[in-house]
Image (cartoon, helix red, strand yellow):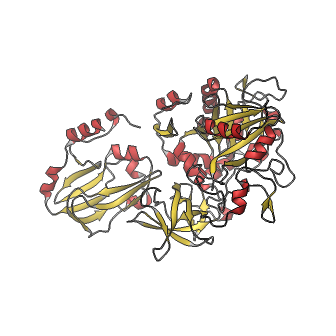
Amino acid sequence: MKELDELLLPDDLHYTKEHEWVKVEGDHVVIGITDYAQDQLGDIVFVEMPEEGDSFSAGEEFGTLESVKAVSELYIPLSGEVVAINEELDDSPELLNRDPYKNWIIKVHPEELEEINDLMDHDSYLKMLEGE
Amino acid sequence: MKHTPLHDWHRAAGANMSEFASYSMPLWYPEGVKKEHEGVIESCGLFDTSHMAAILVEGDGARQLLQRTFTKDLRHCRGVGKPLMEGRCVYGVFLNEKGHVIDDAIVYQKDDGCYLVVVNASMGGVIAGHLAGFNISAVLRITDMTDRLGKIDVQGPSAAKVVKGLLADPLRVLATMPYFSFKGWFERDGAADETLCCGDIPVLLSRTGYTGEFGFEIFTAPRYLQKIWQAILEEGGERVRPCGLAARDSLRTGAVLPLSHQDIGNWPFLRNPWQFALPPTENGKFSKGFVGSEALEAATDCHFTYAFAGYDPRKIPPGGRDGVVDARGRVLGRILSCTTDMAIDRVDGGIVSMATAIEDGRPADFKARGLCCGFVRVRSELDFGETVYLTDGSRRIRVEIRRDIRPDRTARCSIKKMLQMPEEEENERAR
């Protein structure tokens, strides 16, 4: 298990309390899981993703991650429509363990990008982890 | 929380530790549970199982007490008319009068009057007390050995080669060692057939394990555990990988072995895949009477336990709102265990393991994604091959009721074959 100071937590991302990261790219956002999440889950063996075109409200479940021991729900941080899913994860779910920031899960066209202001920045996320 | 003698080693190795039966145990090491699981199929895995408990039963009446309390008929252990004897061990369960499982166990016969009963973590006192309750011999000693015995499991096709390098007299010890036999004792006791490891450490070396794969369990005094663990890692080099409890769980599930208090428990030990733990029967009567036998013989209405396997790695962890339903959504029962065996996958509907030979149907470019598997407990009888669904209220996963799960397991392979297996074949298996 990684110590807190071993975790990779890029400065330029937004974070959720469900241990997901969000990055703004043009008019859409990219969503993945944090290094903390992948480390806690252990080997990820399956990623259940939505279809392109599916719409979700912020906080809704959009998929699941299967590790060997557990099943974890994925919650969408911002309301919007799924514009892309990372199909590489179908055959190689372990990519999320290998590099959870390079290997995103979905891209979403948000209804209101301002919702991103409700998420945590690097420092607040780290503070939350220190409390866990 | 309790620690095994290897606790500091696990921490230093970066293991993800978790509480199991009041012990702090490694779930997996930094390489991850998938590599550990695959490592045991391909080569060799090393498990710290010192959290497990043992009870020593010694003196006149020891065999009679075990005949009375243990499900297995010690006169017919290895088939009818083949009794448990010196240097052999046998798997069975301890039941209460209702026929419900208190715990499962392996009983080792050292000699006529001395048996080692190995049970699950935290069950040493419980089973020792249970045995004492049925003891009628004044000279029998029942000793709870909890935390006084260390245990390491070396599991996988390379296990014999690795263990061979550590034994003081490997040719003698390994020359004949069938499945469920053992050599030596965990402490020096003047016996002629001492088995020594790492020079002069007395060990009980047993050809058993709980992964479904070929291998050994090594029992020794706790103070020697670290030395033996380290020696196995050095001797085995690249072939050996330390493994945590998560890999042990996924391996044993794929091998259709029950986890006590989860797959067997507070219900009659009947209609499950483990009826081989009961004595042979004739006209509905067991070959011996034992604690719980009358309840089992009289039982008319009890649930069925089946193994299952899915079609991809998706699973429904038991607990909470889990259930087993039919195609129309009618509730059939509940999930006992559900995990992913990462060494197997579906090929043309059937299950293939990474250990399956190419001529037996493993595609040359086979890459196992893993399959969800485990056990369900249902009210009515089901057929092997039948489809049922696991659900947690929102997700629904199709699974198949199976007689067996992971094919081409090595547990019963002969030690001779394993010692002769050329490295190329090991590597071929690995691919």
Percent x, y for residue B422?
72, 45
Front position in the image: B396 or B70: B70
| Image-based side of A63 in relation to B346, left or right | left
Residue B128 lies in what quarter of the image?
top right
| Image-based side of A64 in relation to B132, left or right | left
The residue at the far right in this view is B81
Task: Name which residue lies at 63% across and 36% down.
Answer: B124
Q: Against B299, is B148 above or below?
A: above
Residue B209 lies in what quarter of the image?
top right
Task: Name which residue lies at 69% across and 47% down.
Answer: B214
Query: In the rendered image, is residue A1 in sight?
Result: yes
Percent x, y for residue B285?
79, 61
The number of numbered badges drawn on the structure is: 0
Q: Against B151, is B311 above or below?
A: below
Percent x, y for residue B143?
69, 30
| Image-based side of B144 in relation to B372, left or right | right
Front position in the image: B185 or B312: B185
Query: In the rendered image, is residue B415 in sight?
Result: no
Front position in the image: B8 or B112: B112
Percent x, y for residue B415?
76, 44
